[in-house]
Amino acid sequence: MTEPLLEARGIERSFGQVHALRGADFTVHQGEIVALIGDNGAGKSTLVKILSGADQPNAGQILVEGSPVRLDSPHAARDLGIETVYQDLALASDLDPAANLFLGREVLRPGLLGGLGFLDKRAMARDTASEMERLGVRLKDAAAPVAALSGGQRQSVAVARAAMWARRVIFMDEPTAALGVVQTRQVLELVRRVRDAGIAVVLISHNMPQVLEVADRVEVLRLGARVATFNAAEATVEDLVAAMTSGTAEERAA
Amino acid sequence: MTTVDSRPVDQGRPTPDRSWRSAVDRLRRSETGRIFGALVILCAVFSILRPHAFPTTGNIVNIASDASVLLVLAVGATYVILTAGIDLSVSGVLVFAGVIAAKVMQALGGQSVGVLLLGLLAGMVAGLAWGLVNGFLVAKARIPALIVTLGTMGASQGAALLITNGVDVRDVPFNLVLSVGSGTVAGVPWLVVIALAMAMIGGIVLSQTRFGRYTYAAGSNREALRRTGVNASRHLIKVYAVAGLLAGLAGYLSLARFATTTLGGHATDNLSTIAAVVIGGTSLFGGRGTMIGTVIGVFIPTVLQNGFVVLGVQAFWQQVAVGVVLIAAVYLDQMRRAARERP
């Protein structure tokens, strides 16, 4: 197998007396959907925060395509092509989808007007439309504020934003937790499309059947360390639950 | 078909034109349109009741002059309220800046354009300084804006009284009063020209630039703005600084208009400003609002006041009416927000 796209080795993180991560490992390969699962308190969120630059480990190594990197801010992670879809989506709900996709990365008009900070709204709307088209997202009204969209559509906007800027990996924290059946289906379809476009997706989820349905690989965290990795096609919900709750440290081959 | 939302109702809908012109049109049709309608009706009622006194050129110029100082304050307040903040300090800052401008011009002496411009500069710097204090305390010290600006309102008003020993500075350069204070360009008072220019610049910056975009985003979801890598605190400081700067300009304009520092005459300017902005459709929760709405919003209390005077109704009724309209405007805003928030 080629170099992993993103790899974490022996990540340690403690908050006072609490050891959230005790030498956790994690691997993401090019073009795969990998689910990161674990019971509450297993360290999933901490690990994702560290890998998306929002938190710093006390020890351990992070490698992107084999070379060690420092992710000391979300900015640094983004510069390496790593994006995160937060559980709260982090959308400005009064702004339209295009404004949200380009928030913090606005396209300015050419020349003097651009120098004065004038926005090239036409270009941003055009790029947003083609991004939505590419991902198969159809919005009710492309110019409506995000608050006027349904939960699934808002999730789609947040995923599309990440997909637009990610070059390597997108982390998604419980992307379907607040959605109904139909919308969940649509968001998972969107996740697959992102993967098919060549971007690896890390899915954090509690929903075991969903994990097995959509993921290519599953990595299980328990008490701050990786206890198992599964090939999703060969695993069962029972396997996952067993690994999460009583997992032996023995790692199964992916 | 694999679309993320493929309800049949949505299918036939044409993609709306996203040019800014159509965005403006859409806004016109919505809230701004309704506020404008209310203003038109108000003017129509007063015109019908007093056809020879209300809709005259002289009276219209009067209304516009009355509205101009308030409009300059309201331009800044629109930015502040869009970030889900509030600036109560403008009434004190206005007086403080007026005092500084008057004192500087008094010290320099003379009536030259240079002296007038230095006075303007001094007033605006004074306003800017208070704005920076507000912004820093709100964004960095994370003290609620209501408290910060309540504090600086008292402090700036008090400082103005200390500098003047509580006595109005009356020797304002006569040229200032004649030109900016009561002069006209093509029949339009200078005050109105300046205020509308500020509103236009403020409106263009708000709707067309990155600064405006961050202002909306800061009020809509400050954490989201921060996570995209924007220095949201620095943006907030800039917004309060702009409001302070404009309060400084308003102080200078007030000085020009009344030929005195009017130490005690601005106590309710902050509330009138906030009322105008909110009546104009800007949400107190931040994130929603337009400058054109604010311009219309400023004229509603001003027209009411003028209309009551023309009708011979006690002018105090204006305060009552503005209070009622303000509460109604906030209530409508809450209803809109509740209706919009979908699960």
Image (tube, coloured by chain):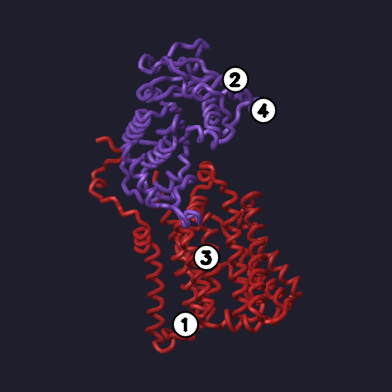
Please, what secondary structure does the residue beneath circle 4 have? Answer: loop
Q: Which residue is mark 2?
A: A22
Query: At 60% across and 76% down in the image, what residue appears?
Result: B254
Instruction: Give the x, y percent position of residue B110.
Output: 70, 81
Q: Which residue is mark 4?
A: A16
When the figure is inspected, residue B293 is found, relative to residue A64, above or below; the finding is below
Chain-order first, disc 4 or disc 2: 4
Instruction: Give the x, y percent position of residue B240.
Output: 59, 58
Q: Which residue is mark 3?
A: B75
Please, what secondary structure does the residue beneath circle 3 have? Answer: helix
Which mark, by number, is residue B186? 1
Q: Find the distance from the CA under tag 1 to the CA under tag 2.
A: 77 Å
Whether marks 4 and 2 lie on the same chain? yes
Q: Residues within 10 Å of mark 3 (few under 14, many from 20)?
A: many
Instruction: Give the x, y percent position of residue B203.
Output: 47, 63
When the figure is inspected, residue B238 is found, relative to residue A77, above or below; the finding is below
When the figure is inspected, residue A109 is found, relative to residue B114, above or below; the finding is above
**Quadrant of residue B94 in the image?**
bottom right
Q: Find the distance from the CA under tag 4 to the CA under tag 2.
A: 14 Å
